[in-house]
Amino acid sequence: MSPQAEPIPPSHQAPFCPHCLHVTEAVHHLIECLQYDHARHELTNALGRNASSIQFLLSDSEAIQDLVLFVNTAQPPITSNLW
């Protein structure tokens, strides 16, 4: 008789985006999730092509202000156990 596999504890399971069911990382909502295309478009209008660069979003002082606005005003609200 083979041993049964232990269930994976919730803290070790990959989180799934509630909107598109992709395995998500913290950057998923900022760059990939289709649910936030409109808000991302506003971010791109404010920052240009660099809005798709995580490095830029987290290092440029003006970009950080726009990024915080994006996260705070995105609808539905961005929620994740990664934040």
Image (cartoon, rainbow, N blue to C red):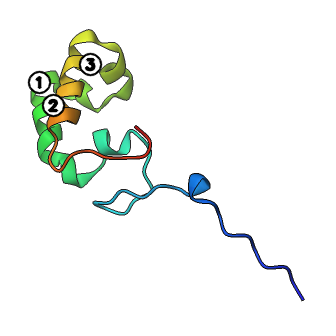
- Is 30 placed left or right of 10 in the picture? left
**Residue furthest right in the image:** 1
Looking at marks 2 and 3 on the same chain, the residue that comes earlier in the sequence is marked by 2
Where is 27 relative to 65, above or below?
below
Location of residue 9 in the rendering, given as x and y in whole percent from the top left corner: 63, 60
Residue at the image point whose x is 16% and y is 25% from the top: 48
Where is 18 relative to 73, above or below?
below
- Is 11 placed left or right of 80 in the picture? right
- Mark 1, secondary structure of its residue: helix
Q: Name the residue under label 1.
A: 46
Q: Mark 2 points at which residue?
A: 43
In the rendering, which numbered label is found on residue 60?
none
**Distance between mark 1 and mark 3 Cα atoms:** 12 Å
Viewer-proximal residue, 4 or 61?
Answer: 4
**Quadrant where the C terminus is found in the figure:** top left
Amino acid type shown at disc 2: Leu
- Pointer 1 with pointer 2, Cβ within 8 A: yes
Give the crowd class for mark 3: few <14, some 14-19, many >=20 residues within 10 Å.
some
Give the crowd class for mark 1: few <14, some 14-19, many >=20 residues within 10 Å.
some
**Quadrant where the N terminus is found in the figure:** bottom right
Residue 52 found in image quarter: top left
Residue at the image point whose x is 29% and y is 13% from the top: 60
Residue 44 found in image quarter: top left
Residue at the image point whose x is 17% and y is 50% from the top: 76
**Residue furthest top in the image:** 61
Amino acid type shown at disc 1: Ala
Where is 14 relative to 47, above or below?
below
Residue 54 found in image quarter: top left
- Is 1 placed left or right of 41 in the picture? right
In the rendering, which numbered label is found on residue 64?
3
**Distance between mark 1 and mark 2 Cα atoms:** 5 Å
Location of residue 53 in the rendering, given as x and y in whole percent from the top left corner: 33, 28
